[in-house]
Image (tube, rainbow, N blue to C red):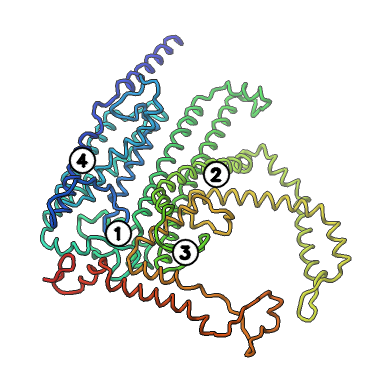
Amino acid sequence: MSSQAAGNQTSFLGATDDYYNMCHPWLCQPSESGILVLLLLAVLVRRHCLWPGCGHGRPRLPSPVDFLAGDRPQTVPAAVFMVLFSSLCLLLSDEDPLPFLTLASLPNSESWKILALLYYPVLYYPLAACAVAGPRVAYLLGSVLSWAHFSIQVWQRAECPQTPKIYKYYSLLASLPLLLGLGFLSLWYPVQLVRSFTHRTGAGSKLGTRGRSWPGLGGPGSCELRPFSWAPWEGWEQLVVLFTIPLFLDSAGFRLPLKLVISATLTGTAIYQVALLLLVSVVPTMQKVRAGITTDVSYLLAGFGIVLSEDRQEVVELVKHHLWALEACYISALVLSCTLTLLLLIRSLTTHRANLQALHRGAALDLGPPLQSTRPSRKAIFCWMSFSAYHTAFTCFGLLVQQIIFFLGTTVLAFLVFVPVLHGRNLFFLRSLGSSWPFWLTLILAVTLQNIAAHWVFLKTHHGYPELTNRRALYAATFLLFPINMLMGGVVATWRMSLSALYNTIHLICRWPLLPSTAIPLPTPGYCTYRNFLKLEASQSHPAVTAFCTLLLAAPSPRLQAPVDPKGNLRTGEEEEGLQLLQTKDPMAKERGPRASRNRARWGLAYTLLNNPALQAFRKTALSGAQANGAQA
């Protein structure tokens, strides 16, 4: 019977392996069609941009995402980045990361896996570029390409729902954000194509205001140029607005930059992917172990000197119960980690909004050394490019560290407190706490008596100032209480270390502005990345906002001036404070330099408001019969 069962099990495993080996979908990713679409978009962008003036020019490659434009829909780039990140996460379970190449027969497969990190951005490049190109043909190409991607992914998941690596349904579950993003794009592009046919009239009058929008400026020149409507084709964007209304109730006319929206989307996707990986890699294995426990486990425990009960069946039930408690601790820690990550994401978005609004007003943020200029720099551009990628990596790594620490904490709490109390056995931890009451009572009394003595015995008020008294008793008490204070210092150090570890673990995945600048003696790479990201975003804001920022940064910061008497001498007590002021003979000469710089900055602001070509479209929209580029009818 045993040989027959072994034969059946072997045949079942062989059939499963044959199923996995045969499960290779013949459909590949539409990479060739994507290249063709990209070439067509290059020709269309050349013709669309050069048609009004000249008919000659070279085809140019369209950008995938216009990151610095405020009037573009933000849902499409967020969906494309979600699709790209989900495709990269699926590389963990795919034996052949490149769909057109089988890596089983290659000697150096790791190099091809690294090549896959460059293949998928190129694969989804045309899918994102169709939304930026603008012409009606681009929406048609985007519709065809998005439906091709979506159909192939659905076909692959329906053909091969199971994979042999990690967990049999991991590939199917991990591809849900991928299918969600592709499904949204396959609906968005046809809707935009229909809108391009139904809204042909009046399209030319909007070119003056659709060229570029400027984030951070409320009112008529803000990025929210379109009225809030409930049109069916804008349902997804309105749904996103409804979910984010609690974050932006006090900031009408303000819109988060596209980089932050993409970072928030990638953070949510990373939470799902990492939580799914942590869940399916541990919980099914623990369930299999719990289901396969027999009475032989009692002999295994007896070999280590652990005797839970004389009844073997009771030992099996106890071990299964402890494994179930361990599984519950793991899932609870995972839920706690994901919840804290989402809460910190919401808080970080509000902090980002406040910091960007402060920079748009020309304020100096407490994020390290003050920014001397809002103009872009080489370091700012590099940090801006890597901002979203850094956030995604921080989220993945931080969630993993949180899961480990929270799992250890919940396990210790469960097996030292809750499980012994429920079973009424193995109460050694609670008994040790009960037997250590003299130690804790001594510490409490020592701290209480020292504070009482410091207030009533060793301190007195003389002429309105507190002074030391009874110094001999103070010295004696300090010497006698040194051992107890040393124990108290050990307890405080342990508590401080635990709180610091918990704080750093929680805020590892958090946006960097939540960390206090005083806690970072040296600028960390993440902190510098965030500051330079804000600098570049502020430099690309509305020209009027940039001029105001320049005006406020160019103006000298107000400093505290010490009061002087009519004779020009320092008042009494200023020598003790260490204040040394150089008094000039001509008080008007001291005001001439700052006043001249402020006047130059104000004239620069006036010139920007009057003569900047980028502001003409915003001024002409208030006139009747306005047309593109400010031309009058």
Left or right, residue 309 beside residue 162: right
Q: Which residue is mark 4?
A: 145
Position of the N terminus by quadrant:
top left
Counting residues from the start of the chain, the first of labels 2 and 1 encountered is 1
Tell me the quarter of the picture where residue 461 sits. bottom right
Q: Residues within 10 Å of mark 1 (few under 14, many from 20)?
A: many
Left or right, residue 7 beside residue 517: left
- Which numbered dot is residue 70? 1
Counting residues from the start of the chain, the first of labels 2 and 3 encountered is 3
Q: CA distance from mark 2 to mark 4?
A: 44 Å
- With respect to residue 139, does 517 lie above or below? below
Label 4 is placed on what type of residue?
A: Leu
Judging from the image, what secondary structure is the residue with disc 1 in?
A: loop
Label 2 is placed on what type of residue?
A: Phe
Counting residues from the start of the chain, the first of labels 1 and 4 encountered is 1
Counting residues from the start of the chain, the first of labels 2 and 4 encountered is 4
Q: Which residue is mark 2?
A: 406
